[in-house]
Amino acid sequence: MQNKRDDAADDSSTDLPRLEKLGSPTGSPPTASLSSLMELENCVSNLSLAHEIVVNKDLSFKPKSPPTHSLEASVTEIVHQAFWDSLQEQLDGEPPNYSHALILLQEVKAILKSLLLHGHIRLRAQLDEVLDMELIQQEVDHGALDLHRLARYIINTMASLCAPVRDPDIRALRDIQSPVELLRGIFHVLGLMKTDMVNFTIQSLRPHLLQQAVQYERAKFQQILDKQPASLDNTAAWLQAAASKEASAIQAQSDSPCPDSQGPVSATAVLNRAYMSLLHWDPQDQKYPETVLMDQARLDALAQQLQMLILEASVLLLINTQCGGVVSSLQGFIGKLRQTITALLEGSHTREDDLQGALMGLGETVVQQVNKAQSSQGGAALPQESQDLLKGQISDLWKHNNPVRTLIGERVQDFLQAMLQGGPAKRIPELPASLKLVSAELAKLGTAFGRIVHFNRTVFGPFYAPILRKLLFSPGEAEEDSR
């Protein structure tokens, strides 16, 4: 395997055979039909995993380890140690008892075979020859079994199959003399190699899934809908709420003196508004739409990033307003200031009490940094009145209706709306001055959000269309452009 693997060498729960929950992949990645793709049940066992493979380019598995110092970790360690102590007692007996060792060798052989690709014909035959369990049993019966010889062959075979990241683990195995510790180490490294193979298979599978992802996800969802017709109820409510808000917004604009012609409610505008609502989702308000459930974790993460960017941009705007451009123009000052803001606000925006306290501390820190920067340039510290005002303004950002936070939020909303309207291939829209300092992060967030929306709209557009027709058009009225 030539792909780069995730670092998982610190895991210690893979040294016991048959305790791993992650199955071994089989054979080489499929390349032809959708049905052959689905034969890799460890990689694509359901719709959610297939979707994750397609949309998450960083998807990878790691061997599972219980939390350090947890009860599960303690019990796991005791069970593992008892297993290997029992094997040690058997091998130390007179004569040695190899019954369990032979079972382990059989399992090692099975794992190694599961790691072979379709073209490893000679290696497969060699495995059957060297790890011939009948021959090994005869060696045991005649007292001629050489575990170290078999272990060396196993390690050499593992070295030829493993990813480069496992080379240090293989070298460490060669230095182990105790047969029990050697077998334990072999199982540990084999567990890591099985995970590597799953990740390699995912990377190999992704291009083929990308070619058929839309049709596959749409077909699978239709199967779910056939079995459970109510599987679009939450989606319909989600679109209905967006349609109502879009109609209200158009009505409000038509009542204003602005001469722009608004026209009827657009299905595209309703969909965009619906997608935008996912970045401000209140689980107490309504249930999450079924068609977006597979991306909920990603969207929730983007929503948290978005709130952090809004708070960060709000703080920077207040500093610029109170201190002018002198401080902000100092080389490196804004970068250090942003690091401070991010560090002090990290994780606090999810609870108002935490946010309020974090902002109070941030106000004090910001004033100190501004005064220090002013002093370094030979300037005077901010007047006490300005210091108190700036700290108070930063502290007030915890309120959702804070005018600065609201202003920044609206401008961010407009930017993301413009990105959705432009589509995935269009140029990133121009940012207002108040968002320039967070432009790179906001553009990255908007691009990620746009990709999720574009793929979701492509897959589920046929399911949205009849719902939108019912919401936006009177019976019998034809819709010219629903997407």
Image (cartoon, helix red, strand yellow):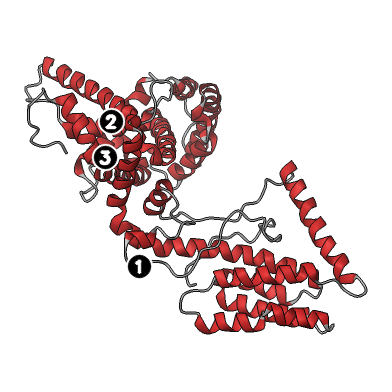
Q: Amino acid at mark 2?
A: Ala
Residue lying at 11% horizontally and 18% vertically, measured from the top left = 254
- Residue that carries the numbered disc 1 in the rendered image: 31
- Residue that carries the numbered disc 3 in the rendered image: 431
Against 246, is 164 above or below? below
Which label's residue is closer to the chain start, 1 or 2? 1
- Secondary structure of the residue carrying tag 1 is loop
State the mark number for residue 274: 2
Q: Is residue 34 visible?
A: yes
State the mark number for residue 215: none
Against 145, is 283 above or below? above
Q: Is residue 285 left or right of residue 159?
A: left
Q: Is residue 179 left or right of residue 165?
A: right
Against 402, is 35 above or below? below
Looking at the image, do the residues carrying marks 2 and 3 touch, with CB atoms under 8 Å apart?
no
User: CA–CA distance between discs 3 and 1?
Assistant: 43 Å
Judge the density around disc 3: few (<14), some (14-19), many (≥20) Cα neighbours within 10 Å: some
Residue lying at 39% horizontally and 66% vertically, measured from the top left = 30
Query: Where does the C terminus fall, quadrant-wise?
Result: top left
Q: Amino acid at mark 1?
A: Thr
- Nearest to the eye among marks 1 and 2: give it: 1
